[in-house]
Amino acid sequence: MSEIKKQTDEAIMEKLRKDILHPITTRPIEFKLWVGFLLTIIAIAVWAYYKQFNDGLGVTAMRDYVSWGLYIASFVFFVATALVGMLISAVVGLLGQKWIIPISRIAEMIALAFVMMAGIAIVVDMGRPDRVLNLLFYGRFSSPIIWDVTVVNVYIFISILLLLLPMLPDLAIIRNHMKKDLPKWQWNLYNILSLGWVGTPGQYKILHRTIRVLLILIVPVALAIHTVTSWLSALTLRAGWDSTIFGPYYVTGAFVAGSGAVLVAMYFIRRAYKLEEYITEFHFDKMGKLMVLVALVYFYFNLNEFLVPAYKMKAADGHHIHTLFSLHGEYGVMFWLTQTFGLILPIFFGLFKRFRKPFPMMIIGLSLVIGAWFKRVIIVVPTLIHAYLPIQNVPDNFKEYDPTGLEITITLGVIAMAVLIVTILAKIFPVIPLWEVAEEKGVDIKKDL
């Protein structure tokens, strides 16, 4: 009987290795074209940033009044989407939901890539990026900006650990079984990152304990990163930002953006690497339900964000609300399109099981991500346009904000860089946790280590 079990385990592991590890050994033309497309966008963005660096921020549409624009909106978006690692791995994982195993690593890759780009978006927004280290040398903890810098870097560090540590057994399997199938540099990479893993009971005990500690630790850090980001706005007296709910409002919005990003990544990774057996319709159904849950909570905060100031209708708040709610307002069309396609319709369609399938969920996820980015523009820009003091004796372009071509190009380049990082991580590392899937199937993987 044990011999039969042994042969069965070997057959299962052989199939798992073939299905899950095969993508890291191939470079299909579609992958090369996709990477080339992203690199082209990034190269054009680098040229645009070089021009901005030489000529100054005057080449953008940001002026004395609207001093934040697409760059800071993108920063808030990246920070928001990065919280999906905490949502999937920590919150859902600690609740004992085993269905998240095949998609947990996708969520961690998105989290790491996007939080890294959040830092880049800040540097891009600086007129003197050479002075960025002054934040560390001369920063004061009475400033919310220092709080933000601190929690972003802590989140990056924990995200790296949460991506790499659970991957140790998989890296050891690659090290032991795929030396002949990989370029020398790639095998050496896996050999170094596997940290000498041999799969002893003591190592597994330490690994499980460490991962659990990190999952618990990342919850307050992730909540802090986006709460502090919201405080950069909420600690002011500006209409549209002067709100006590901005912390939880930002966090729930982050869960929506992150859920959308995971749905999109699940669909394309599943198709590109032929992982339909591991990322199934069941997982899209579960993610669809999770998306609806977090979107309903976010919908409540959206109502609360506008209902309270609209009821009191102070002069400044009234002007701000008219700008957003009226179709004749400067941002009225963008606001209603964002609310409709970035929140209301995804909730509606997500309630029906027939829409919680791979392709519909991908479309819904894409709508959520695009809506989330435009939502950050709506949060950042309209409030700055409506200053308390009259805007007078200045050129007309100080009174409005229409991003320039350079701004849009640089922003697209930063977004392309985030997507490229996810693409590369998903290509050079096993995107499905092999050892955890084997463990769920009752397979002993000691012989593979």
Image: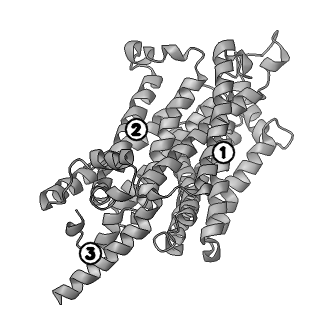
Q: Amino acid at mark 1?
A: Phe
View extreme (front): residue? 180
Residue that extends furthest to the top in the rendered view of this protein: 393
Query: Considering the numbered disc 3 on the image, is that residue within a helix, a strand or a loop?
Result: loop
Q: Residue furthest left?
A: 202
Q: Residues within 10 Å of mark 1 (few under 14, many from 20)?
A: some
- Looking at the rendered structure, the kind of residue marked 3 is Val
Q: Which residue corresponds to the image point at 28% horizontal and 44% vertical from the top-left?
A: 192
> Which numbered marker is on residue 156?
2
Residue labelled with disc 1: 37
Mark 1, secondary structure of its residue: helix
Judge from the rendering whether residue 380 lies leftward or rightward of residue 142; answer left or right: right
What amino acid is labelled 2 in the image?
Ile
> What is the CA distance from the residue labelled 1 to the residue labelled 3?
41 Å
* Mark 2: few/some/many CA within 10 Å (<14, 14-19, 20+): some
Task: Judge by depth and name the residue closer to the eye, 445 or 91.
Answer: 445
Tell me whether circle 2 and circle 1 mark residues in contact (CB < 8 Å): no
Whole-angstrom CA distance, mark 3 to mark 2, is: 33 Å
User: 403 or 229: which is nearer to us?
Assistant: 403
* Residue 199: mark: none
Q: Is residue 433 above or below residue 302?
A: below
Image coords of residue 163 (percent x, y): 37, 49
Q: Which tag, 1 or 3, sits closer to the chain's start? A: 1
Q: Residue at x 73, y 55 (%)?
A: 340
C-alpha gap between disc 2 and disc 1:
27 Å
